[in-house]
Image (spheres, grey):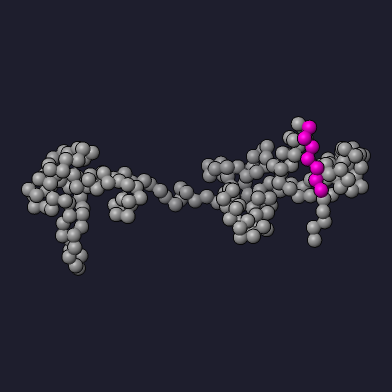
Amino acid sequence: MNPHGFPSRMTVGKMLEIITGKAAAVGGQFVDSTGYKRELTQKILEEHGFNYIGEDIMYTGMEGYSCWGMVYYQKLKHMVGDKIHARSTGPVVNLTRQPTEGRNRQGGLRIGEMERDCLIAYGASQLIHERLVTSSDNFVVDICGKCGVMGMPNWYSFFVTARCQNCRDGSEMARVQMPYAFKLLCQEMTAMNIVPKFILKDVV
């Protein structure tokens, strides 16, 4: 076991278990290592010619003391092949049209709030737009330039262009890209009589 793992994990009992396991191995008996008995463990080690605190001289080109012993160890099987997770395009959620979540559902790797904050701090606005809009749930919406309300394409069957349901005019309709989830939020707010309005500007 890596000695640097003891301070962070605060597993002093593991060290005592190593010494007790060593005493049990050299003494040829079963010992409950969870109940550490110092006097008994030291006596068994000294009777068999070992250091009473578990340290013994090791030779690897140079002489030095090393603490070693037997320990019950559970190996966690973490394989790279079981963890690799990447996708270009794939299934999306029907309601929000965003990529599904989770490796088992062929989901996309999402950028969370912390990652987004780091990108904002770096000034990487184009990367944020590409990750959160273009590669996610990009959607084109018709917005009326007069009243600022989202219009519906081909609202009347004999109109070719989009018309605004509010002012019944399509002369100043503009096509705007936005996340589909945001469009869905605006529609849900409209259903509750909270009508969001957009102020359009020409972006150079």
Return the x and y of residue 32 as percentages of the image width and height.
Answer: 19, 37
Q: Main secondary structure of the magenta part?
A: loop
Q: Residue at x 68, y 50 (%)?
A: 133
Question: Residue pushed farthest left?
Answer: 47
**Residue 197 on the magenta span:** yes
Q: Residue at x 57, y 50 (%)?
A: 114
Q: Residue at x 13, y 53 (%)?
A: 51
Return the x and y of residue 12 as percentages of the image width and height.
Answer: 27, 46
Q: Is residue 194 left or right of residue 120?
A: right
Q: Is residue 87 left or right of residue 61?
A: right
Return the x and y of residue 57 as percentages of the image width and height.
Answer: 15, 60
Return the x and y of residue 98 as percentages of the image width and height.
Answer: 65, 43
Displayed quadrant of residue 66: bottom left
Residue placed most toward the observer, 175 or 77: 175
Question: Residue pushed farthest bottom?
Answer: 61
Residue placed most toward the observer, 10 or 80: 10
For the image shown, how many numbered marks are present on the structure? 0
Q: Residue at x 83, y 44 (%)?
A: 148
Question: Residue pushed farthest top?
Answer: 192
**Residue 159 on the magenta span:** no
Q: Which residues are magenta?
A: 193-199
Q: Is residue 186 left or right of residue 173?
A: left
Residue placed most toward the observer, 94 or 116: 116
User: Is residue 175 among the parts visible in the rendering?
Assistant: no
User: Is residue 181 among the parts visible in the rendering?
Assistant: yes
Q: Is residue 134 left or right of residue 27?
A: right
- Which quadrant of the figure contains the C terminus? bottom right
